[in-house]
Amino acid sequence: MRLQLNPDLVVHAFDGAGRVPRVVCDVPHRSGRPVRFLLPAAVVTVLQKCEPANSIAELAASMSERASGRLAQSQCAVLVETQLMPRGVVVDLDVELVANSMKRRDDYLSVKVTLFSHSVVTFLARRLLWLCSRAAVVIVIAAVLLAHLAVISFAYRENVAWLSDITVHGAAILIVLITIQVLWHEFGHATALVRYGGKNPEIGWGIYLWYSVFFTDLSEAWQMSRKERFHIDLAGMYFQSMFLGVFCLLWLETRQHIWLYAIYGTDLHLANNLNPFLRMDGYWALIDALGLTTLRDFSIARLFRNQNGTNPSFIAGLPLHTKRIAKIYVACSVIFYSVLLVILGWELCKLAFGLAGSIQSWHQITSGILARREVVRLVFTSIWHLVVFILGCLIFTRMIGRLLNAVIPEFSVSTKSLLFWKRSVSRA
């Protein structure tokens, strides 16, 4: 056994908040694309100075010695055995080096399907770069705001239709329009990434919580500055606002209700994306603006306990204003998830009563009271309600875990995540 820092490891500086400098480590992966982790720069520097060791204990002792006592040998041993080696940061040179076998997946996406490869996305993004110039951004945003204000002004003067009045045909057209513009939204993220030097953006589709989303692989953003990451986060909504401007102009010209429905839908989607409590653009923009890697692994008890300097952790090294924002965020997050749990719990109860009623109706099938068409409808309705109920229960329990993680320190995984935090491969 000869343990050493992975010779294929690629290290980049990370622009973030806190007193402890950190670096981005690209670990080779069997898919051909690296898995990225954040590590304290001191840990990587120490490992680079260590000679190949014959055991974990020997490597830990070497690390502790070269850290001048700042790292205890026991801590180094645990770090190597439980974190560095499983992630391929430290490897055994006597064993043939193979690409990391860790799964490249997003914990918050239950389903993930690639739609456009990085070569296709890069090709298209390079031809859209002019939309990211400062002049184009100013002109587009100003035009969209003026068009939207004009729609609001005229809509309140006229007898316009609301979403409750939409027909089945109109709903189908609206779904198509929203789908196209959301896909264009993802190309906004990809174009901004390419503008700042990204080479491997990838666009796909997945399931987040209970609804479907498109996502873009933005893992390369770790190599960029905090300001550039922030721009990438907002580029999707900027691109999507172009569709909003087009819908506004079409309604002003035609007064057809479908374009007003499209404006409503786009506004709702943009507002949802700004929600900082879900893993949407608003959340990523907030943590990148603050120079953090996550706001979801802090607990209320830990944040406020560190206020008096006891049990210091990563939060202790953050600027004062960042600490305050983190505390406000966690408190608001608890309120948000609590309200969401109540709403979801109530809907699950109604769904359970509906299932009970469906089960009671099944005796009509065996007695031959219902016609064949009604039987088919009842069967499909019951199956659909059952699937939704099961998925809702899974989401409900997951949200309870998230709420406990925000309130009780024992449910927090910050010790692990602050040493090794893998930026989500994609962002919805």
Image (spheres, rainbow, N blue to C red):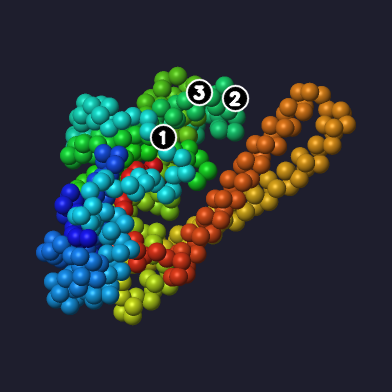
Q: Which label lies toward us, 1 or 2? A: 1
* Helix, strand or loop at mark 1: strand
Question: Does residue 189 appear in this view?
Answer: no
Q: Is residue 306 above or below residue 201?
A: below
Question: Does residue 370 appear in this view?
Answer: yes
Residue 155: x and y in percent read: 48, 31
* Three-letter residue code for mark 2: Val
Q: Residue at x 22, y 63 (%)?
A: 40
Q: Is residue 395 above or below residue 332?
A: above
* Helix, strand or loop at mark 3: helix
Q: Is residue 208 above or below residue 144?
A: below
For label 3, the residue is: 173
Q: Residue at x 28, y 75 (%)?
A: 74
For label 2, the residue is: 168
For label 1, the residue is: 113
Mark earlier in primary sequence (3, 1): 1
122 left or right, relative to 157: left
Q: Residue at x 39, y 59 (%)?
A: 296
Residue 187: x and y in percent read: 31, 32
- Quick one: 376 or 227, which is closer to the camera? 376
Residue 312: x and y in percent read: 31, 75
Mark earlier in primary sequence (2, 3): 2
397 left or right, relative to 7: right
Image quarter of residue 29: top left
The Cα–Cα distance between marks 1 and 2, rounded to whole angstroms, is 28 Å
The Cα–Cα distance between marks 3 and 1, rounded to whole angstroms, is 24 Å
